[in-house]
Amino acid sequence: MSSYPRKVLGERDGLGGYAPTMLSVLRIMSGLLFLAHGTQKFLGFPGGDYAGSGWSFAQLGAYAGVVELVTGALITLGLFTRPAAFLASGTMAFAYFLGHASQSFWPVNNGGDAAILYCFVFLYLVFAGPGPLSLDASRGR
């Protein structure tokens, strides 16, 4: 028997009672991390190899950066979550096959493991929605 009151753990589901809130936490953290890729490309923050590289639209990464900025912000806020997550998921699938898969069969060796993870987390959000801590939920969508 746990020392925590049953109300804290959820009346019936144990930790499962926190699943909707944790869905929101997953969405917020994934959105913030995705947004950071876009801010690095266009705002130079945080600094690094790709800082400021988005302004040269000669490379496809610049277009991915626009998607990262816009959908990262929308996903973080939980606003138009499903369509934003659908676009972000597709962009990451495209990025994986265009930029990573040709370098090696194994994602851990071709640097595409993050793109795959983003792709599937965002695909999950398309179906699961934003969770209760979102602008979509507060708007009743």
Image (tube, rainbow, N blue to C red):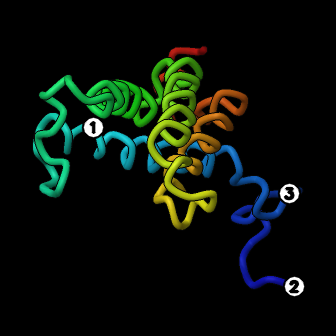
Q: Is residue 38 above or below residue 74?
A: below
Residue at horizontal 15%, vertical 39%? 53
Residue 70 visible here:
yes
Q: Residues within 10 Å of mark 2 (few under 14, many from 20)?
A: few
With 121 as the anchor, is 87 left or right in this view?
A: left
Q: How dense is the environment of label 3, judged by Cα within 10 Å: few (below 14), some, or many (20 and up)?
A: few
Residue 1, numbered label: 2
User: What amino acid type should be assigned to the residue bearing mark 3?
Assistant: Asp
Q: Residue at x 89, y 56 (%)?
A: 12
Q: Which element carries disc 1, helix, strand or loop?
A: helix
Q: Is residue 128 left or right of residue 65?
A: right
For the residues labelled 1 and 2, say whether their Cβ atoms are less than 8 Å apart.
no
Rendered image: mark on residue 38:
1
Of callouts 1 and 2, the N-terminal one:
2
Quadrant of the frame with the N terminus: bottom right
Disc 3 secondary structure class: loop
Q: How many numbered marks, from 0 up?
A: 3
